[in-house]
Image (cartoon, coloured by chain):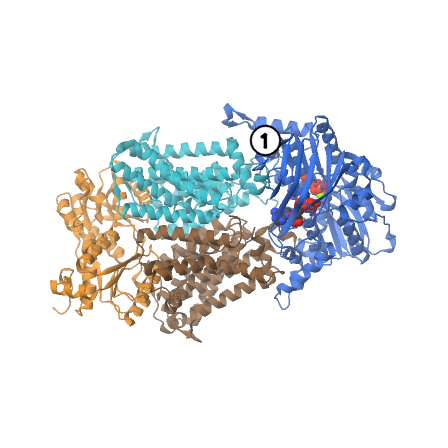
């Protein structure tokens, strides 16, 4: 059982550090594989592009880590990213300045997350259903709002700032991802509500008896998820240069998979942000590597399945879990 | 003629082919999905021709995800291919990447509409509007009565071609004095079958169904057959199941509009090659559609699927 | 303390479904046509069988993301076998393909302790790859009227065979779940896997059986799928897993295991089927349908939850 | 020899749980198995039950060497076990729990015979004298009731070897009696019984022989009649443990909590109780008498349907547990696995959970603070574990109980409600916990301690209140209390109406 190692705890230092590093094993193996097979893969420009391109996935996966840690799920993220990008594009199209538009989208995203959380918690129904409903509603609305035509974003400063611009030599999306990662990590293991999440996910009844405001924590997490999704929508819109209703159907499953590949339990109480980062990186590297390697498009699925399996098995073996 | 404006005009001369071969080019080829006949025929056409002219292809599909397609596009730019051809998931959402290709001097040739920004060498489109207009008009004529009730079965997708097809249907129905009583759409063939069945069931006076994409054609055909009613069908996309229907001699399909995917696949490589040889392409290149009916289906198959054995010969 | 017995409040879901059906009946004469109501029965056959199998999986505390892809792969293989003219052999082969994928899931989960989410995600990719490789993205046609009649189109006791397959599967799975030792063990496993193994239940074998059975049932789903429409495609049943999980969860199955019943899952299936059918008949457009369906499903589950009242949780 | 385990070694990551341990069992004997928390008793018996494979060593049954790949095989061989961790399935009825794996069937096994199942289960319950409806969901049972279900399940399968791992840890006196007569009956049928317990009185009343384990090593096996209490304790703990009684002058102490007519239907039906700061008020009662329900009302977990409460003279009406915590009232649940602890989390996280707010500095918590904090409390309660980063689920039962206590003591409550505070704790540790409870009281906290172990109540309390049928049937100064007197009150019929 590597459960203990997953949770933040007091007394561990080097051994724990080493164990935290082990999930890199699967990712490292894949990177090595690609580097050996394609001359185009292993270089800074490709990695930089990879990081920038996977920022959306990363942000959503960070939020998903918190949600899954609680034993909940959010199936609406892909649809909400698309809807928010559409709104962002339309608002800017209507002449609103980009800071206001971005702020508005962040607030709406936060509100959607809050709504998901509130219905789940106050209605006491599974988040699976609530967010499935939200997914359908958001998808429907993004098509209805646009009449199925993607809305181009012509605001160059916005596009540059959230995609091309650099700060201290690194691309802005990387800074945003890094900031979100640090903030989420701090929240998860250094803040009171964050640490309480582990208890809420593993045993909500016991957490409640320990004085944890379980409902409030759950709603908070969904709201944080909403904000991260909104930030992801901003980056996605800047990257695509448009608000498109079909922009991110694969995002939801990819984000959940990243978290689970990172060793989290779908049923709550166990998740690690560092490992989620690895899981998301694995997915991003896989998608990128397959293009560069020119893997046959039909075989790509099989290769992807087998590599995910190998990475997971390798990681489980390395971290000393059951066979 | 200032620019090359048709698929035929793109044809490479033997000298040009030799020139292209000598350069050892690699082209990236991105489809918006890989499970439909159109994409596969397009790819097959391109693959066959790439062997002829000696260029390498890197092929990928986006499973209808605009973000994924953008990543794939960027990976191709990163790989330094000599040209990129894509059937866009959403033309409006690829412009950023097109700009990056522009600055890397990689020519881009696109199906599905001009991107919002960046320069492409040309936009290739099938004659969506005209094709669906023609097929629908043929059906309206076969129905023959005014005020005929028509249902549309479509795909809820944000592609320019889909909107053009629907417009073609509306105009043709309007011109013949018919009325559209239902417009339903879905992505799945099984759901489309359900929708078609429900629509037929709910409308006793339904005279015709226009299916605006391949799976809708299959679904409409099957639903009409199961209902046993005399409802006529026009369709956009003629694929093996539609051809088999026409071949059976007992069908409600009046006409199908066939896109020339294999031709487009070939034209894609020719267009990119022409651009590399510094020829000027017109802003839009339209490939004409085939109007496939019970009379001409055998000839049409050979045009639409060159070198592929017709299904009725199996 | 009183024994747990079904009381009126347990019927919140029934009431909600009845309200929706009633509303649609008032709104649309075509909906209340008996022929249409019967039609809903067969339209939900595929979803119903997948949801029934998924209920078992969820009950055992697991999840299966591969069902859609596995059903598609079996469908493709079956169609190819039929097209080869191997006749009746197609049926065992189709079931076998599904069963093998199910077995693969089970083995990954039981022998190398991969969480079922990952194991079935892996088979999802593999099954999809297999289906695409086998079809090359083309639609596979076959000609076997007996097969189509047997699995979907044949009439029997006033409804089509597809509906009767659903009835048969739902009854058998209900029996397995509620009336056999095997079912009791699955409830135990899902209630507390650790206790179940301390009690000496063959936990590994139970998981293997569940996943293999689900796989084989997806073989059946694949056959019904192609029998309904008469062709097979690599993406025939993609996405089925989410609808199936949704139907089971709407019916009250708890992700995490231990809770769920077949009749309530069937109510969930019925709800989805009725909404799909009714909204199409009312000619609500696809995107608005999404919005309405999303909202209604949440509302129905809220009503159901509210009717059942607060359970004592701590 | 019916069952013999010899030279058994078992290692868990970082722990040598068993180190050449041995144990033998004769047919028709009750063999008490003793040892401190974490000595390895449960582990050894899990090996005998086929749940764990030993790293080394041999098992023989009826003189034949055997090895069990899983619990099913052990059961088939006739070894049935009531595990320390309850394995009652919450989502199933009592009947389904009792008959799991051998449900009555009709039609050649094709059809579960539900009627027969309920009838059979009910008859098992009735035969064993357990007052339970076989149709209710097990999730709603109290811990004691679950334990009875567990015992009934094992006994009903005509075992050859019956292993009982702390079967009475949440049983009241009446159920205990029931179990004892059951054991006598099985003994007469030549069943060999392994009996693990931390209750001394039971050992001497019940067992024929005693085996003691310490730190995974065999210490002794002897006839019970040749051993006495101090000797046994010394063998287990390696030193002597004192026992004493208390009795403060209540009138001199300030009133901490007072209830009047406190009720919540149907379990609590009008409780008048006064709890003083500085005293330990024991609460006795039969299983299901409403003690836990009462404590939950005081802790703000459930809402009363009637009556009033005051806390240090002020109106006290907590609308939820956080409100109660905010006013310094803490509750230690009897259901360690379900409500007390978060098993997959570490010791540190468990202990710190209710204290996180206090440990935070400007909203952030340093992991080191949690570590130090947890280490301190682990030391105070003598939690045996490598460090605070160990997952609680890998601890022995007694050590888990200590963690669950530490977690609540750590918030330094003004009123602490202890529900079975020494469930599954060994004698040595018990004595330490008693000392600790007395210490908290001496430091001024008001302690209310529910326990089903009457000697324990007599030893730790200043006064003992007895609950019967949801009411207080009497309050006795501990100095004057006798087990018989308390039982009389517990059975009091006057409160039943
Ligand atoms: N699954 C496990 N993983 C790791 N360590 C374990 C596991 N089970 C038991 N241990 C360790 O083995 C040792 C023996 O534990 P065991 O449960 O056998 O003690 P016990 O004698 O039954 O104690 P108690 O009286 O408290 O029940 C303890 O140190 C415990 O922490
Ligand atoms: N979690 C629960 N859910 C439902 N009913 C419960 C629960 N806990 C206790 N009860 C019921 O409430 C009644 C009073 O039980 P309670 O646990 O308060 O008694 P107790 O005197 O503490 O006995 P015990 O020794 O079993 O804890 C019993 O009938 C019991 O079955
Ligand atoms: Mg033990
Ligand atoms: Mg109690």
Quadrant hosting residue C200 = top right
Q: Which chain is orange?
A: B
Of residues D308 and C174, the one nearer the viewer is C174
> What hue does chain A carry in this figure?
brown
**In the rendered view, does A245 fall on the left or right side of D147?**
left
Residue that mark 1 sits on: D76
Count of picture labels:
1
Of residues D315 and C172, the one nearer the viewer is C172
Q: Which chain is cyan?
A: C
At horizontal 51% and vertical 31% (from top left) the residue drawn is: C180
**In the rendered view, does D124 fall on the left or right side of C82?**
right
Residue B40 x, y percent position in the rendering = 25, 52
Of residues D395 and A61, the one nearer the viewer is D395
Of residues B89 and D163, the one nearer the viewer is D163
- Quick one: label 1, few (<14), some, or many (20+) residues within 10 Å? few
Q: Which chain is blue?
A: D
When the figure is inspected, residue B277 is found, relative to residue B161, above or below; the finding is below
Quadrant hosting residue D475 = top right
């Amino acid at each position: 059982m590597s459960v203990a190692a997953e949770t933040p705890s007091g007394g561990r230092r080097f051994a724990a550090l080493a164990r935290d590093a082990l999930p890199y094993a699967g990712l490292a193996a894949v990177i090595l594989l690609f580097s050996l097979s394609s001359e185009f893969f292993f270089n800074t420009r490709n990695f930089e592009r990879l990081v920038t391109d996977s920022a959306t996935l990363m942000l959503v996966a960070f939020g998903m880590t918190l949600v899954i840690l609680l034993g909940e799920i959010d199936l609406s993220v892909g649809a909400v990213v698309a809807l928010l990008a559409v709104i962002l594009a339309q608002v800017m199209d209507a002449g609103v300045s980009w800071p206001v538009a971005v702020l508005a989208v962040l607030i709406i995203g936060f509100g959607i997350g809050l709504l998901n959380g509130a219905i789940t918690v106050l209605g006491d129904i599974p988040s699976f259903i609530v967010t499935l409903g939200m997914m359908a509603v958001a998808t429907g609305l993004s098509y209805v709002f646009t009449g199925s035509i993607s809305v181009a974003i012509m605001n160059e400063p916005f596009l540059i700032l959230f995609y091309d611009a650099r700060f201290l030599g690194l691309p802005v999306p990387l800074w945003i991802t890094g900031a979100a990662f640090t903030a989420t990590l701090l929240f998860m293991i250094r803040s009171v509500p964050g640490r309480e999440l582990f208890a809420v996910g593993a045993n909500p009844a016991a957490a409640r008896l320990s004085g944890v405001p379980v409902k409030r924590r759950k709603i908070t997490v969904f709201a944080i998820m909403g904000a991260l999704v909104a930030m992801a929508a901003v980056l996605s819109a800047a990257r695509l240069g448009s608000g498109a209703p079909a922009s991110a159907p694969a995002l939801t499953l990819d984000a959940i998979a990243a978290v689970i590949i990172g060793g989290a339990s779908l049923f709550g109480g166990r998740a690690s942000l560092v490992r989620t980062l690895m899981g998301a990186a694995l997915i991003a590297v896989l998608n990128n590597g397959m293009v560069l390697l020119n893997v046959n498009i039909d075989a790509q699925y099989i290769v992807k399945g087998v590599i995910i399996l190998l990475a997971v098995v390798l990681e489980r073996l390395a971290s000393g879990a059951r066979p | 003629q200032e620019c090359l404006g048709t698929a035929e005009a793109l044809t490479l001369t033997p000298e040009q082919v030799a020139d292209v071969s000598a350069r050892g080019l690699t082209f990236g080829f991105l489809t918006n999905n890989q499970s439909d006949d159109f994409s596969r025929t397009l790819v097959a056409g391109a693959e066959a021709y790439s062997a002829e002219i000696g260029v390498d292809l890197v092929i990928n599909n986006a499973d209808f995800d605009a973000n994924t397609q953008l990543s794939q596009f960027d990976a191709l730019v990163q790989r330094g291919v000599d040209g990129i051809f894509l059937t866009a998931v959403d033309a409006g959402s690829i412009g950023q990447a097109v700009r990056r290709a522009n600055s890397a001097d990689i020519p881009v040739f696109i199906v599905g509409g001009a991107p919002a920004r960046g320069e492409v060498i040309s936009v290739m489109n099938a004659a969506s509007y005209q094709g669906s207009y023609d097929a629908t008009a043929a059906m309206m004529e076969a129905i023959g009565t005014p005020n005929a009730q028509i249902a549309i079965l479509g795909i809820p997708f944000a592609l320019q071609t889909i909107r053009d097809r629907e417009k073609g249907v509306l105009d043709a129905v309007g011109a013949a004095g018919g009325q559209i009583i239902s417009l339903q759409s879905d992505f799945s063939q099984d759901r489309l079958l359900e929708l078609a069945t429900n629509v037929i069931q709910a409308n006793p006076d339904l005279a015709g169904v226009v299916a605006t994409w391949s799976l809708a054609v299959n679904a409409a055909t099957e639903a009409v057959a199961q209902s046993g009613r005399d409802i006529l069908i026009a369709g956009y996309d003629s694929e093996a199941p539609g051809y088999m229907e026409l071949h059976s001699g007992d069908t409600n399909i009046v006409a199908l509009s066939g896109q020339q995917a294999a031709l487009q696949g070939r034209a894609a490589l020719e267009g990119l090659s022409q651009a590399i040889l510094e020829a000027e392409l017109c802003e839009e290149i339209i490939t004409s559609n085939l109007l496939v009916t019970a009379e001409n289906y055998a000839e049409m198959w050979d045009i639409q699927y060159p070198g592929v054995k017709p299904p009725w010969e199996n | 303390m009183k024994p747990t017995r079904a009381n009126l409040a347990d019927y919140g879901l029934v009431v909600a479904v009845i309200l929706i059906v009633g509303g649609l009946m008032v709104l649309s004469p075509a909906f209340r046509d008996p022929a249409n109501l019967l039609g809903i029965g067969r339209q939900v056959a595929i979803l119903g069988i997948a949801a029934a199998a998924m209920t078992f999986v969820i009950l055992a505390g697991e999840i299966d993301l591969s069902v859609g892809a596995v059903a598609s792969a079996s469908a493709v293989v079956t169609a190819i076998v039929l097209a080869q003219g191997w006749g009746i052999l197609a049926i065992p082969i189709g079931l076998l393909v599904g069963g093998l994928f199910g077995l693969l899931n089970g083995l990954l989960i039981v022998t190398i302790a991969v969480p079922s989410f990952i194991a079935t995600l892996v088979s999802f990719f593999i099954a999809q790859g297999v289906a695409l490789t086998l079809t090359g993205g083309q639609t596979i046609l076959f000609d076997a009227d007996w097969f189509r009649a047997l699995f979907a189109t044949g009439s029997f006791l006033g409804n089509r065979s597809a509906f009767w397959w659903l009835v048969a599967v739902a009854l058998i799975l209900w029996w397995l779940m509620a009336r056999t030792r095997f079912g009791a063990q699955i409830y135990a496993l899902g209630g507390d896997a650790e206790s179940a193994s301390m009690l000496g239940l063959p936990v590994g074998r139970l998981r293997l059986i569940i996943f293999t059975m689900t796989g084989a049932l997806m073989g059946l789903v694949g056959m019904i799928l192609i029998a309904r429409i008469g062709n097979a495609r690599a993406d025939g049943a993609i996405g089925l897993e989410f609808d199936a999980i949704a139907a089971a969860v709407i019916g009250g199955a708890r992700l995490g295991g231990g809770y769920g019943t077949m009749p309530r899952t069937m109510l969930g299936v019925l709800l989805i089927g009725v909404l799909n059918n009714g909204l199409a008949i009312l000619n609500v457009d696809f995107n608005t349908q999404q919005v309405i369906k999303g909202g209604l499903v949440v509302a129905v589950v809220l009503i159901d939850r509210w009717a059942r009242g607060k359970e004592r949780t701590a | 020899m019916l069952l013999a385990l010899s030279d058994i070694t078992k290692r868990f990551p970082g722990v040598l749980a068993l180190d050449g341990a041995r144990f033998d069992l004769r047919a028709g004997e009750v063999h008490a198995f003793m040892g401190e928390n974490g000595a390895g008793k449960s582990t050894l018996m899990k090996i005998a039950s086929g749940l764990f494979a030993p790293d080394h060593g041999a098992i023989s049954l009826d003189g034949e060497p055997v090895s069990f790949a899983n619990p099913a095989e052990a059961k088939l061989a006739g070894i049935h076990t009531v595990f320390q961790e309850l394995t009652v399935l919450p989502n199933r009825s009592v009947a389904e729990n009792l008959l799991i794996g051998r449900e009555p069937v009709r039609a050649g096994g094709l059809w579960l015979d539900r009627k027969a199942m309920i009838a059979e289960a009910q008859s098992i319950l009735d035969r064993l004298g357990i007052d339970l409806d076989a149709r209710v969901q097990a999730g709603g049972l109290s811990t004691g009731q679950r334990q009875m279900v567990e015992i009934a399940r094992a006994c009903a399968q005509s075992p050859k070897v019956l292993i009982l791992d702390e079967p009475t840890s949440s049983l009241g006196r009446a159920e205990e009696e029931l179990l004892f007569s059951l054991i006598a009956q099985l003994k007469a049928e030549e069943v060999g019984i392994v009996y693990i317990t931390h209750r001394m009185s039971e050992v001497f009343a019940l067992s024929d022989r005693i085996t003691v384990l310490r730190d995974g090593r065999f210490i002794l096996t002897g006839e019970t009649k040749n051993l006495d209490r101090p000797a046994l304790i010394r063998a287990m703990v390696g030193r002597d443990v004192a026992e004493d009684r208390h009795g403060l002058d209540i009138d001199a102490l300030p009133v901490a909590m007072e209830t009047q007519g406190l009720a919540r239907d149907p379990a609590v039906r009008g409780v008048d109780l006064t709890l003083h700061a500085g005293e330990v008020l024991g609460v006795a009662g039969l299983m299901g008498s409403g003690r836990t329900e009462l404590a939950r009302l005081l802790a703000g977990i459930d809402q009363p349907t009637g009556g009033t409460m005051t806390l240090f003279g002020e109106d006290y009406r907590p609308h939820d547990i956080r409100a109660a915590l905010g006013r310094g009232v803490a509750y230690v649940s009897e259901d360690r696995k379900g409500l007390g602890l978060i098993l997959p989390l570490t010791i540190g996280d468990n202990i710190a959970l209710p204290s996180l707010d206090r440990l935070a500095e400007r909203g952030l918590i340093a992991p080191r603070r949690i570590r130090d904090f947890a280490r301190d409390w682990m030391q105070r309660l003598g939690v045996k574990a490598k460090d605070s980063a160990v997952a609680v689920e890998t601890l022995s039962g007694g050590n888990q109980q200590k963690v669950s206590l530490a977690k609540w003591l750590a918030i330094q409550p003004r009123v602490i409600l202890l529900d079975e505070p020494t469930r599954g704790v060994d004698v040595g540790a018990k004595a330490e916990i008693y000392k600790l409870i007395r210490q908290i009281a001496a430091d001024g906290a008001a302690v209310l301690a529910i326990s089903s172990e009457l000697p324990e109540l007599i030893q730790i309390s200043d006064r003992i209140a007895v609950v019967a049928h949801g009411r207080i049937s009497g309050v006795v100064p501990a100095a004057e209390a006798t087990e018989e007197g308390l039982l009389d009150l517990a059975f009091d019929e006057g409160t039943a109406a």
